[in-house]
Image (cartoon, rainbow, N blue to C red):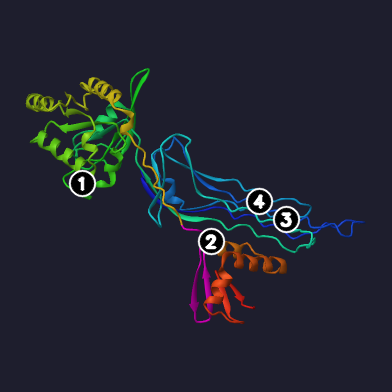
């Protein structure tokens, strides 16, 4: 089954917790702090696997969560870092942040990687908080919280040649005749309901990757028929083989209609070089009626061939011509989509809102600090209070009129204000 769109949830691993621990050995009454650090959580990474050509996996698995880092231990032993979660995707996969619709990356090269969620760093153990004035700190950090994102994946097939035409023109028959692909073939419109890929070997050193795109009809750029769901797969092809039904009432009208739909969907599609083939030469009267069509198309500058996908007549010359045209196409015509950089906000920024039962403080840095605080350790709580002062939260709350005994909410934590 061919799947070219998917929406999934990705979450990196939480950092491991640092610990409060003191060296305890015989004859060493004051060994000092030796709490180890937590390990780093795993990243979520997309990697191109050239053996894949569909997003089918994401139909059955919608949630991808990396492992958490290991917790620190005594004797200055750090927790184990978690392995990264690598998700294979086919070449041509475009990755968006679903919430913001921001383009994160366009993966086209084999082995290319994109990190979408960074693992949380491990919390520091109390060994890092010892000072000349506080040689036995009961202060440590929990691991940094994970990143979570809803990701939208879109696949645009990577092929040298795209096969286009009206429904039932013989595109799938052509693909089956020149490659080992086995698309569904039948004598009725819209037999092909999904793009098909195949490789045509012209000789021992020359291959062409072809993509059969489901039949297009008038209004396809607006989603009519099988619509624009498949037009996007033509955008990355370099050359088009335009198949005409030789038994049609007016093949030239079909040719004009398809080119118009391509141009309306993407102006660059109309500029792609085309090799035209008039199919169904095996049917009575087609060879005679095709003479005028071929002359007209060649006068317009299109190399044109009369073929029969059924009897495999004249297929090789058409493929070699497509290869010849392909070699002349500048590489710059195929452009991967590039992410647009948009400066993010300062993570130190915060907001304060008055609620019925207290004050709500929101902000990336203050919320992360709250999640990394050991509230059961006095030293960690004092450190959090100093962070509130450093970020300006303390002053802002005083300016808004906070009083002793008021409740301050940060995420799910409830703190009582005391001067």
Check disc 3 and report the residue beneath it. Answer: 128
In which quadrant is the N terminus drawn? top left
Chain-order first, disc 1 or disc 4 = 4
Residue visible at 71% across and 54% down in the picture: 72
Q: Residues within 10 Å of mark 3 (few under 14, many from 20)?
A: some
Task: Between label 3 and label 4, give the one nearer the viewer.
Answer: 3
Q: Which labelled disc corresponds to residue 348? A: 2
Q: Is residue 55 left or right of residue 231?
A: right
Q: Residues within 10 Å of mark 2 (few under 14, many from 20)?
A: few
Q: Position of residue 95 (x, y in %)?
A: 41, 47
Task: Between label 1 and label 4, give the one nearer the viewer.
Answer: 4
Q: Is residue 356 magenta?
A: yes
| In contact (CB < 8 Å): disc 1 and disc 2 | no
In which quadrant is the C terminus drawn? bottom right
Q: Is residue 396 left or right of residue 268?
A: right
Report how far apart the C-alphas of labels 4 and 2 lie in the structure. 25 Å
Report how far apart the C-alphas of labels 3 and 4 lie in the structure. 15 Å
* Span colored in magenta: 345-363
Task: Between label 4 and label 2, give the one nearer the viewer.
Answer: 2
Question: With respect to residue 324, does 368 lie above or below?
Answer: below
Question: With respect to residue 380, does 314 lie above or below?
Answer: above
Secondary structure type for disc 2: loop
Q: Which labelled disc corresponds to residue 220? A: 1
């Amino acid at each position: 089954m061919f799947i070219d769109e998917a929406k999934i949830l990705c979450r990196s691993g939480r950092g491991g917790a640092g610990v409060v621990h003191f060296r305890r050995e015989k004859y060493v009454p004051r060994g000092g702090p030796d709490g180890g650090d937590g390990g780093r959580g795993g990243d979520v990474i997309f990697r191109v696997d050239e053996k894949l050509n569909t997003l089918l996996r994401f139909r059955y698995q919608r949630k991808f969560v990396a492992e958490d880092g290991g917790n620190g231990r005594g004797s200055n032993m750090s927790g184990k870092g978690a392995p990264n979660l690598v998700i294979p995707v086919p070449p041509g996969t475009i990755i968006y942040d679903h919430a913001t619709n921001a383009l994160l990356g366009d993966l086209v090269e084999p082995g290319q990687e994109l990190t979408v969620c960074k693992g949380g760093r491990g919390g520091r153990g109390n060994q890092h908080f010892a000072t000349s004035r506080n040689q036995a700190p009961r202060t440590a950090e929990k691991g940094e919280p994970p990143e979570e994102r809803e990701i939208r994946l879109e696949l645009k097939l990577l092929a040298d040649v795209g096969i286009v035409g009206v429904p039932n023109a013989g595109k799938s028959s052509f693909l089956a005749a020149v490659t080992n692909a086995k698309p569904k073939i039948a004598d009725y419109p819209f037999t092909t309901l999904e793009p098909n890929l195949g490789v045509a070997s012209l000789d021992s050193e020359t291959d062409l990757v072809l993509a059969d795109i489901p039949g297009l009809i008038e209004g396809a750029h607006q989603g009519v028929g099988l619509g624009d769901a498949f037009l996007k797969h033509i955008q990355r092809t370099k050359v088009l083989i335009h198949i005409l039904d030789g038994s049609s009432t007016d093949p030239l009208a079909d040719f004009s209609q398809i080119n118009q739909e391509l141009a309306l969907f993407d102006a660059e599609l109309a500029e792609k070089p085309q090799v035209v083939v008039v199919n169904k030469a095996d049917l009575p009267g087609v060879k005679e009626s095709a003479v005028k069509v071929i002359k007209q198309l060649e006068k317009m500058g299109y190399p044109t061939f009369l073929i029969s996908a059924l009897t495999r007549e004249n297929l090789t010359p058409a493929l070699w011509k497509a290869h010849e045209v392909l070699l002349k196409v500048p590489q710059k015509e195929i452009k991967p989509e590039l992410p647009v950089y948009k400066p993010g906000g300062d993570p130190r920024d915060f907001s304060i809102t008055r609620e019925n039962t207290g004050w709500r403080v929101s902000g990336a840095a203050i919320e992360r600090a709250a999640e990394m605080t050991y509230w059961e350790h006095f030293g960690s709580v004092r450190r959090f209070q100093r962070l509130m002062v450093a970020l300006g939260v303390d002053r802002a709350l005083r300016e808004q009129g906070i009083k002793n005994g008021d409740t301050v909410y940060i995420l799910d934590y409830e703190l009582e204000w005391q001067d």
